[in-house]
Amino acid sequence: MAMTFFQRIESKVIGRILCASDATVTRMTEPRWEVDGKPLDRRTQYMFRVGRIVERSMPSLTADAARRYYARLNRVLEAEPPAIDRATDRTIAMRSGDRPARAYYPAQPSSRDQVLPGLVYIHGGGFTIGSLETHDTLCRRICATARCVVVSIDYRLAPEHPFPAAVEDCDDAYRWVVAHAAELGIRPDRIAIGGDSAGGNLAAVVSFLARDRGGPLPYAQLLIYPGTGSVDHAGRTKSELQTGYGLDAKTSRWFFENYVGQGDGEDPLAAPLYLESHAGLPPAIVVTAQFDLLCGEGREYAEKLRAAGVPVVHQHVPDLPHGFGTMSILPRAREAIADFATALAETFHRGTPSLRSS
């Protein structure tokens, strides 16, 4: 969706503020913010500091207002994406009705004729916010770096459509992409699934649903700072992470309560950490961030997969917060995005991800 004139002006003004000189950033980021002795990236700390002027508490907003706020925030925190060949809007038939999707194709020789690997991408947003538009830049970055078709899918959001609506839509979307791989120009034996935050949760859930019905399994899982546990997971009680880094404890609880309500917060369909068995799941690239309320459960999920014999590459980002995938105005965020997209490329094109495990 094209930005209006005023949105472009707003984005440029805030972009200039966030692109302040190194001397300004250094002056305004002392003392350094740390978690477990690891310092936050300076420009990210500067962003959080200046951003407090306009910061809003999502739980104080209606769901619609929170979605508008998040969309506006994303517009000003994203840098210009790399060039790709094209992005094509699609419609996917689901049990809940037809829903929009967008397919991204990388810029490379013969890309219009070559059959490429594919990634079904599920946007984050706590099951409550987020859209194809908020994650458009991230999908373009993954598409360009991983050299794959990215099919970004839309799904019903809570609280209007609580659990398991999102699970049903994402599972339907994955199955639709598998069935229409030839039409999409995707290799049917190279279809991965991925997402960030709530989208990482849903990607993990779709993966075990595919396993449990006998396939076809995703070729790989790309789980970017995924929420895999319940709202009461021990990792979410870490005192240093309760406020200050974007996703705070109050917002995390609001998201989860919007989605699950009075249901079982440890139902594996809502929290895949609690699966009885993680054996037989697709190889996974799990990305965690030090300054993230969900870091602990992401680490634990990677460990559970590995213990169950699933090939896992765990990329831990020691100096960034939750949500960095949609903060590409930050140079360090762009580096981290390139890292996990490169791991996906290597998984597709060589068969094994090669990011350094941690």
Image (tube, rainbow, N blue to C red):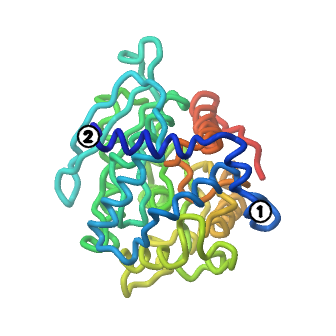
- Mark identifier at residue 51: none
Q: Nearer the viewer, residue 39 or 232?
A: 39
Task: Give the residue furthest to the top.
Answer: 109
Using the image, determine if residue 232 lies above or below residue 336. Answer: below
- The residue to which callout 2 is attached is 4
Viewer-nearest residue: 39 or 236: 39
Whether residue 57 is situated above or below residue 338 in the rendered picture:
below
Label 2: how many residues lie within 10 Å, few (<14), some (14-19) or many (20+)? few
Element type at marker 1? loop
- Is 219 on the left-hand or right-hand side of 313? left
Query: Which residue occupies 60% across, 79% down?
Result: 233
Q: Distance between the residues labelled 2 and 1?
A: 38 Å
| Residue type, label 2 | Thr
Name the image quarter holding the N terminus. top left
Name the residue that disc number 1 marks: 31
Q: Which of marks 2 and 1 is nearer the N terminus?
A: 2
Quadrant of residue 63 within the rendered picture: bottom left
Which type of secondary structure does the marked residue at label 2 adopt? loop
